[in-house]
Amino acid sequence: MTMTDAAGRARFTELVKLQTQGRRFLDRDQERKLLEEGLTRYGLTLDEAQGLLRGAAQEGDVAMEAELGASSRQLLRTLADRRNRVARDDFARAVAFYRARAGGALTDAEARRRVKRLMEELDLQPRPSGRILRTRRWYRAIDA
């Protein structure tokens, strides 16, 4: 089945709108499935499919994990001290930012896990906290 480029783009955009309807957040697996659909079924290039997906997500006010990760990485780098450590309060701010950008579609525990994964990708360490006994237990308690 061949279709014109414009018709393929329009149908892919409608598919994305359908898939994102009622959602506030698309994780990486969902993004990848939609992009694969655009490439295989609608004959789009990767750049075209990404652009249409991004546009439809923005129009529907749906957060995408890939883009959310990029802005969260920058925030974590900014919050880290000179020794690449993130304080517990700053970690909590990054989690709140992540949840807010995801439109509240994630639980606090999910957002904590995702921010912890981002910290690990960036090779950032948790800063010990506590008044007498300074530990990183707060960070280790987050399920990986």
Image (cartoon, rainbow, N blue to C red):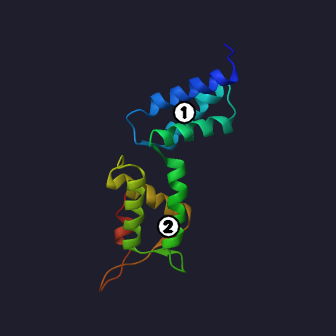
> Which of the labelled discs sits on residue 76, or is there none?
2
The crowd level at tag 1 (other Cα within 10 Å; few <14, some 14-19, many 20+) is: few
Work out how far the residue at label 2 is from the one at label 1, CA to CA, in angstroms. Answer: 28 Å
Q: Farthest residue in the top direction?
A: 1
- Residue 59 image point, x, y percent: 49, 40
- Looking at the rendered image, the quarter that the N terminus falls into is top right
Is 133 left or right of 44, judged from the image as shown?
left
Q: Secondary structure at mark 1?
A: helix
Residue picked out by circle 1: 33
> Which of the labelled discs sits on residue 105, or is there none?
none
Which residue is at a point 50% across and 64% down the rendered structure image? 119
The amino acid on which the numbered mark 2 sits, given as a three-letter code, is: Leu
Q: Secondary structure at mark 2?
A: helix
Q: Farthest residue in the left direction?
A: 132
Residue 2, quarter of picture: top right
- Front-most of residues 57 and 105: 57
- Residue 46 image point, x, y percent: 67, 36
Proximity of marks 2 and 1: CB atoms separated by less than 8 Å: no
